[in-house]
Structures are given as C-alpha cells and as structure tokens.
Image: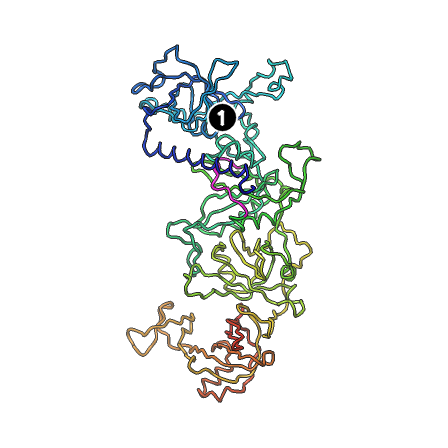
Amino acid sequence: LYRGGLAERLCRLQNRERSAISFWRHQCISDAKISSEKSGVLIVKILEIFEECTVQVAICQQLEQSPATCSPEDAAINSEEPILKVLFTRETAAHLKSRPQDVIHIYPPWQKLLLRNSDVPVIMNTYFSQKVLLSERSEAREKTYGLAKMLIRRNIISLAQTFRLDDHDDELHQESSDNRVACAPQIHKSCDSMRHPLALSAVNDSLLEMVESQGAVGWREAQVRVVIQRVYCLLTRQGYRSHAQGNKLLTSNGGMFCRLCLLVQDAYGMFSEVQLQSLSSADDVEQYCRRWEGKFCCLAGMKILQRTTRGRTLGLFSLIDSLWPPVVPVKVPGQSQDSEMMTTSLPPPSFCYILTIQSGEVHVEVDEEEQISNLYQPPAVRGLKEILQNDGCHERCSFWAQVLYLRLQTKHSVPINQREILLFVTDSTLQNAVHVIPKVVPVSVTASCVLSTEIIEALSAAPRFAFFKDALWGNGRIICVERTVLLLQKPLLCSAAGADLSELTGPVRLDELDSTTQANSICALRGTVVGVNESTAFSWPICNRCGNGKLELCPQDRELLYCKQCSEVVMSPVLKMQLEVFLSCPSLSQSIVKVKVWHEISSFVLYVYTKTYEVQSVLGKEVGLLNCYVHSVTSHPNCVALEEIVLL
C-alpha cells in the first residue's frame, strides 16, 4: 500500500474497527451483561432470518423494553410496534448465532436508513450487538439449539435483476435446498463431505475469498481445498532445543514442544501457513513430509492468527519465493477460469495469512490416496558447488551431503540449549572441485531450527549423508533456520535438476591450511614443531570402559578411582592429556600457528613429550596431516589458533 494513500488509511480504519469490536465483546464477557438502560440502545426481537449478498438480514420487531424475567417466547409484543430490517455482517452473525424469537440489544452507533420505496426501515452498523438470555429456560434452549443445525434461506439476487435487465422476476426468487447454508458450526470430516448437497456451496478453492467471506472469527460454514507444499515444525515461544543426550530433543517450561505446520497454496497461487497441533518431539516430521507433501487437503474450522507481510517474516517469504512462480498456470481472481485466462506471470505474494486450529473441531483432512497435485513443487536439489557459486542473497536451497564433523558453538553468554550447531558437510561436487572451491563447508544450525532426536544421534555417531531441505543461503553462509527440515533419507519426490546425488566412495579430503582459511572452518595441517606452551599442558584420567572423564575417589579405598556411569572401580584408568604446540607451516610462513593437540589424537607428539617431559624432545618433530578446527585467524599479530579434531 502507498504510504498515506486512501487504501492504507482505510486499512488502518478497518483495523481500529476490528479492535474496537473485539474489545467491546471482551467487555461483554467480563461484565456478564451490559446494561440496556444506556441511552440509544435498540431492542429488537427476531421474527425471520435470511441471507442476501453475504449479509444476514433479520426481520425484527422493535421492543419498548427488554423483558426482565420472561423468556423470549413469552415476551409481550405490541402489534403496533414497528417492523425493522436489521443487517448483520457475517462476523457479527457468527458471533451472535441468533435465531427467530431471540431478543437482541443493538448498541450505538447504529444507523437507521429510510428507503424511498419501502415502509420498513433498515438498521445498519450493528457491530455492537448482544443476544440476551433472559432465563434458565432460554439458556437451556440455547444449548440445545447450539447442537442442532439451522438452515438459513439464501436469496440469490442476480445482476440482471439488480440492473432490471430481465423481467422474469419469478424465476429469480427460486429457493431450493441447494441454496441453504448451515448456520451452526459445521465440521467436515473428510473431503467426501464436499459431495453432500449442503456442502456444495461451502467448498472453496480460494484462501483469500474464504478469509474475506468468513472473517477473523473462524471458518464456521465452509472449507477450502489447498495443496500442501511443505511440512515442517516451528518452536513455540516458550520452546527451546536441548542437546542433552538421552533426553527429548525439545523441552520447555510450559510443557509445549514444537508445532506441526503446513505451508499450503490454493488454486490462485495464494499461500498460507497453517499451524496445527503441538508435538512432544520432532521425530514424526519425516513421515508427515513423506505422506502429506504434494497432496490436496481440506481446511475447516480455521481462524486467522496473523496477517503477515514480507517485511515482518523474511524467513517465511524466502520459502514462498522459492516456490514462485507456480509450475502450472493458476487462476486469476475476477476473471474466467478457462485455461486461456490462467497464468504463471504473476508477481510474488506480498502478504500471507497464518492460520491456526480451533479447539474441538476436525481441521485438516488430507487425501493421501489422491495423486500428487500438478501445483506441487518438490525441493530442487542442487550440488554444494552450484550453491556456493550462486550470487543470490537469502535464497532457499536443498542439497544432499555427507556430515563429517559436528560441533556445538561455545558462546558462554548463551545457554547451552540455545547455542548453534555447526555441521561440516561435503559432497562429490566439492571433493572433485578445483582449489578455488572449498572441499568442506560449514552449515550453521540455529536454535530456531527444529531437529529430531534421531537426526542428532545419527549425525553425532558416524559419518552420515543427510538431506537439507529449504536451508537458507546468503552472504557466503548456509544456515538452517525456521522451516528448514533435515532428513536422513532423500525424499521420494525431489527435482535433481542435473545435480550429482551420488555418495562418496573414497576417503574425504580437507583443504590444507593456507592464507584463505577462515575461522570456524576445518582444514588439514602439516608442519614442524617449533615451540610448546607448557603452561597449558594438563592431564586427567578417564574410565577405560566408557570414557567418562569425571572420575571420583573410591569411598572404600581412597587410592582407587570410581566411575559413576559404570558403577565400578576403575583399575586401569587411561591418562588423557592436552598440550598446546606451535608449528611452522610452509603454507603460512609469516604466521604463528598454534595448535591444541590431544593425547588420543596426536599420539606421536604427546607420546614423546610424556616420556621425557622435556620441550627439547618434541622440537623439530614433523606433524601431519592433522585434521583441525580453526578457532580464530588474526592479522595483528599474524596468528592462527586451531584445535585437533576427529572426523566422524
């Protein structure tokens, strides 16, 4: 919308109007009743209800005062009281759930419109309306009627009649059961319900039309048919990720975990994010992806959680942009639905509705037996080399790669369950590439990306191939963020687009340390020991059975060590040692290369040192090739700090 334009001002006015109505209804609930003694309150009794042009029209009789003790059926009506035609918007009608014989209080600012050719005044602006339950009997009747389904007559007014182009007025007033809609909330348990006569007019293929007609109060009478483009999990506000082994992946103080979500698209190309039920863990996401993606589903009982724009949720729209333009022509609103009127040359959506479920109703019915929709766009799998050579910014990418090393970021100011994970990955396109392309790239997994316990355990134990679906590429980094899904198997439906998806057969090669090496990367290192930082050297015993490094003194014999994990005395502990050495590397002759080495990895250097505990015994020794993680690279002074690691 143009800033300061008419559309923006109208949008603000509508937002203020919705807020005022919501606040007023909240007051009604809080205060139980709002006094009808207030000046200007119009009290009416409904005699008949019908629907016309999406507006509910109630033929009412005005009451002088609301009966205090009797039920609406027994309310005395003066035959001389005027008859009114009261208009209720779809949202107001859904809130009131009114029926004939109900008494309604209409609060200002309502307006009366006097028509030139009619004796019945029309009451408009009835947003602030309240149904009055006058006794226990009427309250019981309300509960009983709430379970029943009431049919409201729908008057079909054609354009020919509106503009007096046709004299056959009798044909235009026909009414049949097909033109009646359900007033009470209706639940469609499956897509088969679309074949029911009452549901023929209730099934829609436009998300936007459904939102406009049903409003924010919820889709009570209809359902919309959409295609599931993506399935993923989102963390709730209280949710956070836990890396503790053996525990559930997702934990939170409020007992909420993660929420299953669908990104759906309608026949007009409009997208919407549907937030479904909460899950105790993300382990089931893979099966939902396999069963649901690409299938049609019917949404019912939804309510609007938020209308969001590109500027508010860049992550959501980066995923939408990766699915745009549509692979098949989509319908154009307001035009004929013939094939020649459908197009793919449309601008990408600028807004998206986030929908959520309403409690106690059947909300989503996926037709798993139906074939994959032509509108579905499977993830386009590319090689890592192609992704790195792409100049795009904040683009979604999908790839199949081998995870070589997993590292938890060690920012001490951040809680351990909210730290990022670094996964170092490679594929055949990188291993066979020339020197200008790195052979291994880091993938940053943020705390907002939901990982299943199965993924964490599998990637921590052994080198595994994993499928990264809808990761974010930009500014030279690959990041797994919200709506990114990691799978251990390639999806059944994916667009390879010429990418090499073969698995590596030979040994994995790392880039050797040189002037282009960056921090938070891994590399191979060879050099000569030129110094030892003895102040950093320390050793500690570990259990020879389970590797536990937190041994305690045995209560019975203080000279022995005890392992709590094994619940046994450790008779032959293994001595573990750390030492920091300085190397001279041919590839970085002008820099100080500082490497933290471990006893079980660089056994040769530490073996010689622990035999004599003399620095001279290791100086001049050749080291390499060592696999190292690069902690930092500084230019003043020229120094590279590394740590020896073990690849999976």
Task: Count the marks.
Answer: 1
| One can see residue 147 in this view | no
Which residue occupies the foreground of this view, 103 or 22? Answer: 22
State the residue at coordinates (32%, 31%).
Answer: 32
Seen from this angle, which residue lies furthest top? 79
Task: Read off the residue under disc 1.
Answer: 182
State the extent of the magenta-drawn residues as a range: 299-310
Callout 1: few (<14), some (14-19), or many (20+) C-alpha neighbours within 10 Å? some
Give residue 576's quadrant in the image: bottom left
Residue 436 sits above or below residue 224 on the image: below
Taking the image as drawn, is residue 358 in sight?
yes
The front one of 93 and 81 is: 81
Residue ID at (58%, 81%):
589
Q: Establish if 418 lies above or below 91.
A: below
Q: Determine the main secondary structure of the stretch shown in magenta.
A: strand
* Residue 644 or residue 5, whichever sits in front: 5
- Work out which residue is located at the far right of the displayed protein and give it: 340
- Assign the N terminus to one quadrant of the image: top right
Give x and y (percent) for residue 438. 62, 67
How far from the left and from the top, in percent, is residue 562?
34, 73
Where residue 275 appears, x then y in whole percent? 49, 44
Q: Residue type at mark 1?
A: Ala
Is residue 271 toward the left or the right of residue 30 in the image? right
Q: Is residue 381 magenta?
A: no
